[in-house]
Amino acid sequence: MEIWLWALLGILLVFIIALVIKLYLLRKAARELAEGFADRMATGSNTLLDLSCRDKEMLFLADSINKQLRKLRRERHRFYQGDTELKHAIMNISHDLRTPLTAICGYLDLLKREELKADAKRYLSVIENRVIVLKQLTEELFGYSIILSAVEIKKESVALNDILEESIAGYYVALKQRNIVPKIQMPESKVVRLLDRKLLSRVFSNLLSNALKYSDGDLEVILLENGEIAFVNTASGLNEVLVGRLFDRFYTVEAGRGSTGLGLSIARTLMEQMEGSIEAQYKDGKLRVYLRFQHII
């Protein structure tokens, strides 16, 4: 009787050991599937999942995941191809619109020199304003398509003080026409960061243009020693909800004079390409846009 008992215990022990080994192999296979799937999703690799385990059910699961990965790869390829075609189409269309718009602006200038009746002058003024808006939108679309397609960032040591001063000086006339006298606060020492000079100038230009659209007549530009920059202006035509959507593509509000809804969206894209950040806040009737840069020299 004892022999049978020991034999039964031996069989049970072997069964338990085999079960433990089986569970270990299944857990190992599950980890391989999870890690492999995460790697394929992160890198977009064309390599399919493979298992060290030969368990039938786990192999079936791996095969099912591989089928979905093949399908996802095809859909991703179609998406990138369509996205590239769309960018090129926008670039070509906006470029093609430049020539007729330039011609229209030229003929409008010629018409303004002619003797016209009061109504004709008024109609001409309306047409001219609409053409300016259309031309601005075309330029923004062209710039946006180029920015989205850009992959090479030419970083160099730039002093934020200098680029900011140059940008504000470039908007002197436009600010003066709106009776805006900007208050500028900067440290005496140079605040240097590793950035793309042209992209940074474009960001500042878009933010100054944004201030012209939404400001009630004031503008404050603050540069801190840690590299943070703030553009602050009173904007009674905005609120927290509207400000939360200012970075959305093509989003405009009535307070934006001639706005295309692309300026801040482009600024955000450029900041992300330079590994920086941009955010907007609205408090006590003031719009505050903050820029932060990571690369310190």
Image (cartoon, rainbow, N blue to C red):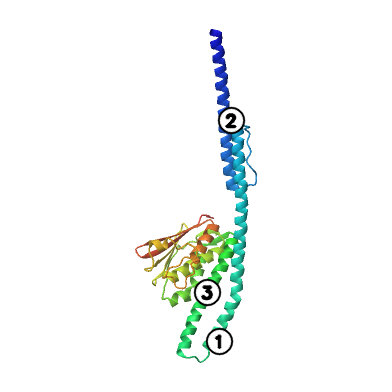
Quarter of the picture containing the C terminus is bottom right
Residue 43, compared with residue 117, is above or below; it is: above
Q: Nearer the viewer, residue 219 or 271?
A: 271
- How far apart marks 3 and 1 lie (CA) works out to 19 Å
Residue farthest left in this picture: 284
- How far apart marks 2 and 3 lie (CA) works out to 65 Å
Residue 64, compared with residue 1, is above or below; it is: below
Q: Nearer the viewer, residue 97 or 287?
A: 97
Label at residue 211: none
Residue 179 rendering spot, x and y as whole percentages: 41, 76
Residue farthest top in this picture: 1
Q: Amino acid at mark 3?
A: Leu
Residue farthest right in this picture: 47
Q: What residue is shown with label 3?
A: 134
> What residue do we see at 41% from left, 62% from top?
243
Q: What residue is shown with label 2?
A: 25
Can I make out residue 153 in this image?
no
Residue 157 rendering spot, x and y as whole percentages: 56, 60
Category of crowding for the residue at label 2, using alpha-carbon neighbours closer than 10 angstroms: few (below 14), some (14–19), many (at least 20): some
> What residue do we see at 58% from left, 47% from top?
42
Depth check, mark 3 against mark 1: the one in front is 3
> What residue do we see at 47% from left, 74% from top?
172
Q: Amino acid at mark 1?
A: Leu
Q: Are marks 2 and 1 in contact (CB under 8 Å)?
A: no
Depth check, mark 2 against mark 1: the one in front is 2
Q: What residue is shown with label 1?
A: 110
**Going from the N terminus, do you reach mark 2 or mark 1 first?**
2
